[in-house]
Structure formats: structure tokens, C-alpha cells
Image (cartoon, rainbow, N blue to C red):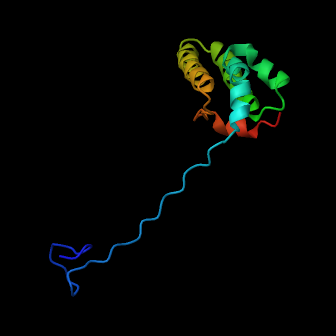
Amino acid sequence: MEPGENMGSSSEAGGVSPVAPVTPTPEAPKTIFSDTDIAENKFVAALAYLGILFLVPLLAKKESAFAQFHAKQGLVLCIAFVIFSFIPVFGWLINVVLVIVDIIALIKTLSGEAWEIPLIKDAVKKLNI
């Protein structure tokens, strides 16, 4: 049997059934930062996920795209945390989730990753700071 032949019955002569070409599905574009930017600024960028300390990378590391990316996410998370703090019970539960997301983002930042937090990534992209 030749490679590519179908062992089952086929309506075509020769027993080979046509195979449709597989086209890859497009993935969302990933944010890419230089290795030196990440290495030099990951500790400052991690401050973005510690409440009001998002101001440190936002103001002190304006030249670092990596630090600015995380500072903007930290800003949105901090605003969300403050808003949900005023909503009894439900807001407090949301804040627990936000703290967990903060911890995950902090760990990923320290490991040099640029994790786009799913529910806030659109708001972060609209920030023009």
C-alpha cells in the first residue's frame, strides 16, 4: 500500500480520498517585550500589583514598555478593588477574586511574563497614559 492511501472503501478510483488542507486558526497577537527590558524592570513592574504602588512603575519607568504594561493593569485592578469595596458581600467576594488575580499576575510578572488579564485587557488597551 502506498503512503497516503486510505485502507477503507472509497468512491474514488485508486482508493485515495482527498484531504482538505488544514489552515491554522489565527491567535491573538501576543505582547512581546525585549529580554533586557524584562530583566531590568520585572521587579519594579511587579509593584504594580501591590495596590497603590502601581504608581511606581507608571511614573518611574516611563521608558519601559514592560513596566508600563503592568502598571496599567495594576491601575485598572486597583480602581476595580476600590469600587467593589463599597458593595457589601458581592463586592467583597469579587475583591477576593481580584486579590487572587493580583497574586497570579505578580508571580507571572516576576517570572518575566506579560499576562493579559482576560476581563480587563480591553480597558487596559484603552488607557493612554
Residue 111 in picture, x, y percent from top left: 59, 25
Q: Is residue 105 left or right of residue 61?
A: left
Residue drawn at (19%, 79%), measured in percent from left and top?
10
Q: Is residue 61 left or right of residue 30?
A: right
Question: Toward the viewer: 30 or 36?
Answer: 36
Q: Is residue 23 left or right of residue 102?
A: left
Figure quadrant of the C terminus: top right
Residue 66 in picture, x, y percent from top left: 72, 32
Q: Classify residue 104 by image quadrant.
A: top right
**How many numbered marks have been drawn onto this rendered protein structure?**
0
Note whether 19 is above or below 60 in the view shown. Answer: below
Figure quadrant of the N terminus: bottom left
Question: Toward the viewer: 26 or 87?
Answer: 26
Residue drawn at (67%, 14%), measured in percent from left and top?
50
Residue drawn at (84%, 22%), measured in percent from left and top?
60
Q: Classify residue 35 by image quadrant.
A: top right
Question: Toward the viewer: 119 or 56?
Answer: 56
Residue at the farthest bottom position:
13
Residue 36 in picture, x, y percent from top left: 72, 33
Residue drawn at (15%, 77%), measured in percent from left and top?
9
